[in-house]
Image (cartoon, rainbow, N blue to C red):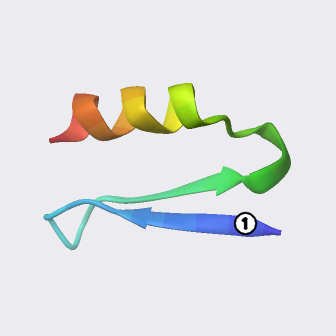
Amino acid sequence: MYILYSNLSPTMTYKFEVTHITPQKFISVTLLLS
Protein backbone atom coordinates (compact mmCIF):
# COMPACT_ATOMS: atom_id res chain seq x y z
CA MET A 1 0.00 0.00 0.00
CA TYR A 2 1.36 3.40 -0.98
CA ILE A 3 0.68 7.07 -0.42
CA LEU A 4 1.28 9.39 -3.33
CA TYR A 5 2.53 12.82 -2.38
CA SER A 6 2.51 15.41 -5.14
CA ASN A 7 4.30 18.70 -4.74
CA LEU A 8 3.06 21.90 -6.38
CA SER A 9 5.10 20.89 -9.39
CA PRO A 10 3.33 18.11 -11.34
CA THR A 11 6.69 16.57 -12.21
CA MET A 12 7.48 15.96 -8.56
CA THR A 13 5.59 12.94 -7.29
CA TYR A 14 6.87 10.87 -4.39
CA LYS A 15 5.77 7.42 -3.36
CA PHE A 16 6.04 6.35 0.26
CA GLU A 17 5.26 3.08 1.93
CA VAL A 18 2.45 3.69 4.38
CA THR A 19 3.97 1.30 6.89
CA HIS A 20 7.27 3.17 6.90
CA ILE A 21 6.01 6.75 7.08
CA THR A 22 5.62 8.68 10.30
CA PRO A 23 4.07 12.13 10.84
CA GLN A 24 7.51 13.56 11.65
CA LYS A 25 9.03 12.23 8.44
CA PHE A 26 6.07 13.35 6.36
CA ILE A 27 6.27 16.88 7.80
CA SER A 28 10.01 16.96 7.16
CA VAL A 29 9.57 15.91 3.52
CA THR A 30 6.75 18.40 3.05
CA LEU A 31 8.86 21.24 4.40
CA LEU A 32 11.83 20.17 2.34
CA LEU A 33 9.84 20.23 -0.90
CA SER A 34 7.85 23.39 -0.22
Q: Is residue 14 above or below residue 22?
A: below
Amino acid type at mark 1: Tyr
Front in this rendered view, residue 8 or 12: 8
Q: Answer few, some or many: residues within 10 Å of disc 1's Cα (few below 14, many 20 plus, some between 14 and 19).
A: few
Would you identify the image quadrant in which residue 15 lies?
bottom right
Front in this rendered view, residue 13 or 5: 5
Question: Which residue is under mark 1?
Answer: 2
Q: What residue is rendered at 15% in x and 41% in y?
A: 34
Front in this rendered view, residue 16 or 27: 27
Return the x and y of residue 17 as percentages of the image width and height: 75, 52
Q: Residue furthest toward the front?
A: 23
Return the x and y of residue 16 as percentages of the image width and height: 64, 51
Q: What residue is rendered at 57% in x and 36% in y?
A: 23
Q: What residue is rendered at 29% in x and 59% in y?
A: 12
Return the x and y of residue 8 as percentages of the image width and height: 14, 64
Numbered marks: total: 1
SS for callout 1? strand
Q: Would residue 26 be found to the left or right of residue 12 on screen?
A: right
Q: In this view, does 33 lie above or below 19?
A: above
| Quadrant the N terminus occupies | bottom right
Would you identify the image quadrant in which residue 5 lies?
bottom left
Q: What residue is rendered at 53% in x and 68% in y?
A: 4
